[in-house]
Image: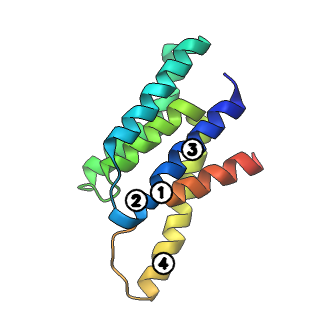
Amino acid sequence: MNRIVCSCMGLLFLAGLWTEDIREKKIAVYKVYFFAFGAICYRLGAGSCSLWELAGCLLPGGILFVIAWVTGESIGYGDSMSVITLGLWTGGWYTGMSVCIGILMSGVWGLVCLCRKKKDPMPFIPFLLLGMEAVLIYV
């Protein structure tokens, strides 16, 4: 697959969700489905749709989905569905690194919020977007 097209679509996907996630602390599922359907169509058209490759692409989002279920949706199912969709666009390796960087950044921001005694729910998509940008710039 063309790495530039997939990376741009992944960034466009996250950029379309981050303001909504900040304002409302939830995301529209139809946007996630739309981009996931587009990613599947692109993969089928490019001919890179092997079972092992798809499993690798879905692994980071699947792990987040299990974490969301175990923690009573502390991270949210919408975030895990977004990571699954991002994985379909960029692949499992880039998505996994983006999630790790995003979790690290959100943890730092969480510590700042704890010091300021703010206990509001924190959106994850903006940190995922920053993690994706960092991965694409430095990797």
Q: Secondary structure at mark 3?
A: helix
Q: Nearer the viewer, residue 137 or 61?
A: 137
Q: Say left or right for 116 vs 75.
A: right
- Which is more N-terminal, label 1 or label 4? 1
Please tell me how crowded label 1 is: few (under 14), some (14-19), or many (20+) other residues with Cα within 10 Å: many
Label 1, label 2: how many angstroms apart (C-alpha)?
5 Å
**Label 3 near label 1: C-beta < 8 Å?**
no
Task: Tell me the element at label 2.
Answer: helix
Q: Which mark is residue 12?
A: 3
Residue 21's disc number: 2
Q: How is the image coloured?
A: rainbow
Asked if one can make out residue 84 in the rendered structure from this viewpoint, the answer is: yes
How many discs appear? 4
Q: Earlier in the sequence, mark 2 or mark 3?
A: 3
How far apart in space, not on screen, are marks 4 and 2 (Cα)? 20 Å
Disc on res. 18: 1
Q: Position of residue 71 (x, y in %)?
A: 27, 56
Q: Secondary structure at mark 4?
A: helix
Pointer 4 or 3: first along the chain: 3
State the residue position of label 4: 111
Instruction: Identify the amino acid type marked 1.
Output: Trp
**How dense is the environment of label 2, judged by Cα within 10 Å: few (below 14), some, or many (20 and up)?**
some
In whole angstroms, how far apart are the C-alphas of marks 1 and 3?
Answer: 10 Å
- Classify residue 139 by image quadrant: top right
Apparent side of residue 18 relative to residue 131 in the rendered image (left or right) = left
The answer to whether residue 106 is above or below residue 112 is above
